[in-house]
Image (spheres, rainbow, N blue to C red):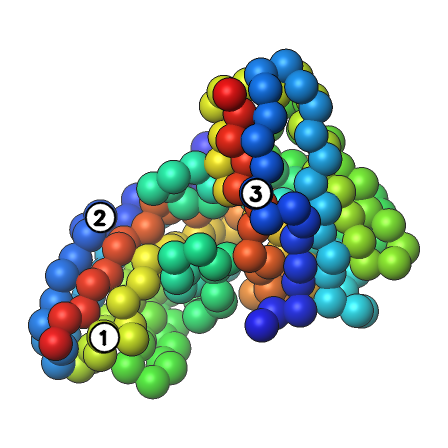
Amino acid sequence: EDQVTQSPEALRLQEGESSSLNCSYTVSGLRGLFWYRQDPGKGPEFLFTLYSAGEEKEKERLKATLTKKESFLHITAPKPEDSATYLCAVQALTGGGNKLTFGTGTQLKVEL
Amino acid sequence: ETGVTQSPTHLIKTRGQQVTLRCSSQSGHNTVSWYQQALGQGPQFIFQYYREEENGRGNFPPRFSGLQFPNYSSELNVNALELDDSALYLCASSPGVDFETQYFGPGTRLLVL
């Protein structure tokens, strides 16, 4: 069974204090790993998709990387508006139709 | 705004009752996926419909069922409600079956008493 574990559960940063969020995964074969951002009371918002080990993608202050066992979401010089829950999800290379497995998320709070 | 709407926004039901949740996808989006998100947890994939056919299902019992209509609307039906069904139910639409291009609605919060 596909499993996704995110750490830490919660993270508090000062504005400008860079850090990384971790997503460890177990799948029979990875078709894609996804990062989403979720604000309170809203549905998740897509950030990145990574397909193979060594791949990296960037968007503003965020950079996602992928290895064979885990993914990192690096946040450089965060601002208060980066405060949100960050979710990681995996899609496996399995038959029987599509399926997406999410982790429990990391709740990020960036303070002035 | 993602162009995906859900109704109702909030709902209270009693254990054993049945509920229907609705989703309106973006025009041209042939795929809709449904998720259950308990408080403090990540979303759990319920199922995906592509062109009105089920295209994948998570670990949910048969009392969770769905319908997708040609007019880009869809329904999630849950029979014999249990207390643990209390959660935020999210739908997401996409042009094709890949998850990268899915856009989420704001969700329906269901409380089962």
> Gap in Å between the C-alphas at discs 2 and 1?
18 Å
Q: Chain of mark 1?
A: A
Q: Position of residue B96 (x, y in %)?
A: 72, 63
Residue at 55% x, 35% y is B110
Outermost bottom residue = A60
Q: Label 1 is placed on what type of residue?
A: Pro
- Nearest the eye: A76 or B15: B15
Q: Do labels 2 and 1 touch, CB within 8 Å?
A: no
Above or below, comparing residue B31 to residue B111 in the picture: below
**Which residue lies at the image location 46% right of the left edge and 33% below the top edge?**
A1
Q: Amino acid at mark 3?
A: His
Q: Do callouts 2 and 3 mark residues in contact (Cβ within 8 Å)?
A: no
Work out whether residue B40 or residue B49 is closer to the camera in this orientation and state it: B40
Residue B38: x %, y % from top left: 43, 37
- Return the residue at label 1: A80
On screen, residue A81 versus residue B4, left or right, reads: left
Q: Mark 2: give few (<14), some (14-19) or many (20+) Cα within 10 Å.
A: some
- Chain letter of mark 2 equals A
Residues at marks 3 and 1, common chain? Answer: no
Residue A76 position by quadrant: bottom left
**In the picture shown, does residue A78 fall above or below B74?**
below
Q: Rounded to the nearest whole Å, what is the CA distance between mark 3 and mark 1?
A: 29 Å
Quarter of the rendering containing residue A55? bottom left
Question: Distance between the Cα atoms at labels 2 and 3?
Answer: 27 Å
Find residue A9 and name its label.
Answer: 2
For residue B71, what is the image quadrant?
Answer: bottom right
Q: Secondary structure at mark 1?
A: helix
Say what amino acid the circle numbered 2 marks: Glu
Number of the label disc, if any, that sits on residue B10: 3
